[in-house]
Image (spheres, rainbow, N blue to C red):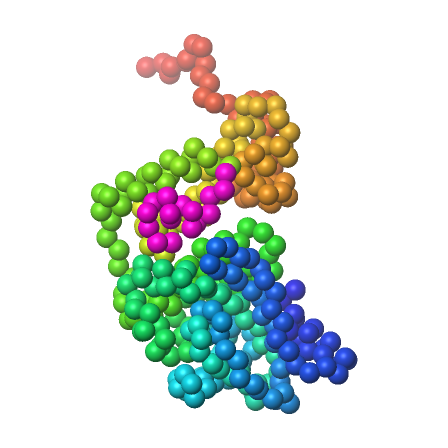
Amino acid sequence: MSIAATVERALARREIEGSPGRVAPTVLARGPGWSVGDVVCTCGPQDRSFEEQHSRYTIALVAYGCFEYRSTASSGRGRELMTPGSLLLGSRGLSFECGHDHGSGDRCIAFWYDAAFFERLASGAGVRRTLIRRAQPRMPPTRGLATLSARACAGLSRSDGVAWEELAIQIAGETLRFVSGQPQRMTVSSTDIKRIGEVVRLVEGNAGGPLGLVSLAEAAGLSPYHFLRLFERVTGVTPHQYVRRARLRDAATRLASEPGKILDIALEAGFGDVSNFNRAFRTEFGVSPRRFREALTHSAYPTHPTYPTHPTYPTL
């Protein structure tokens, strides 16, 4: 179902029931210090706005519709029209109101951060906490945000394979850079390479184990924000992509060398269910796990080229 269709269906249900507009968040994923939710709002011009307060640091990507975000007198940051592609920036403890004078319904992907976790990200990005609290509440669509926004919106229609933890940290990082006005620069030292090399060895030696981004960052002795940027700078892929491919390589090796069931191999390689494993495997190797094993068993793919025993040379 499209992003817009979900909102339209919710509005139609509201019309039938005669109920007031409401905000309905659905948690998509969560981890230590962060969570992400699909927030569908059915409020319209007929609904009275009321004062709310951010309980956590919030970065909400507007996926559909538009609404007016008004900071109250206690925060004194004015009002903004939130449009698709823009980010709503909410600092913990600040009060606000939302209005829908322009029409009914909107949908956002909200990233919520506990104070300690977000302040770690800010520290890793070199941004002062006071600067975050003074920032304008709206970040317009930017080139640096375009790919992240597309990935987040695509995640609304997918049930698995979405790297929400990485997205939460990447979107926070892009926001922090925008707020601080800092360009994205990164130099890599020999110490950085050593740290990432140790993490790579950790992943390769325990691909099927719990390998969340935060735990890998802790193993490297870095903040999650800095670790994510550094890992991608050094290896060319994000930690999520690297772990996923390491698990697929491990599974492929087992399929080629062990007689175990595909389900058992998928679980031991770190995949939560066989359907997710099958899709990821086919994307990576071009065939299903079963076809991959059968092809190797029947030597469909020779491991070395064959040559004639007595080659024939042209007559001179």
Of the 4 image quadrants, the one containing the N terminus is bottom right
Magenta range is 209-224
* Residue at 68% in and 78% down: 11
Task: Report whether residue 54 is seen.
Answer: yes
Say how many tags the image has: 0
- Whole-percent x and y of residue 274? 63, 40
Q: Nearer the viewer, residue 172 or 247?
A: 172
Q: Nearer the viewer, residue 85 or 72?
A: 72
Q: Is residue 169 left or right of residue 67?
A: left
Residue lying farthest right? 16
Q: Is residue 130 left or right of residue 240?
A: left
Vertical comparison of 40 with 161: above or below? below
Q: Is residue 265 left or right of residue 196?
A: right
- Whole-percent x and y of residue 254? 54, 28
Vertical comparison of 190 with 28: above or below? above
- Whole-percent x and y of residue 7? 64, 73
Vertical comparison of 126 with 96: above or below? above
- Whole-percent x and y of residue 164? 50, 56
* Residue at 32% in and 67% down: 177
Of the 4 image quadrants, the one containing the C terminus is top left
Task: Report whether residue 232 is seen.
Answer: no
* Residue at 56% in and 34% down: 268
- Assess whether residue 103 is covered by the magenta stretch: no
* Residue at 32% in and 73% down: 130
Q: Nearer the viewer, residue 79 or 315?
A: 79
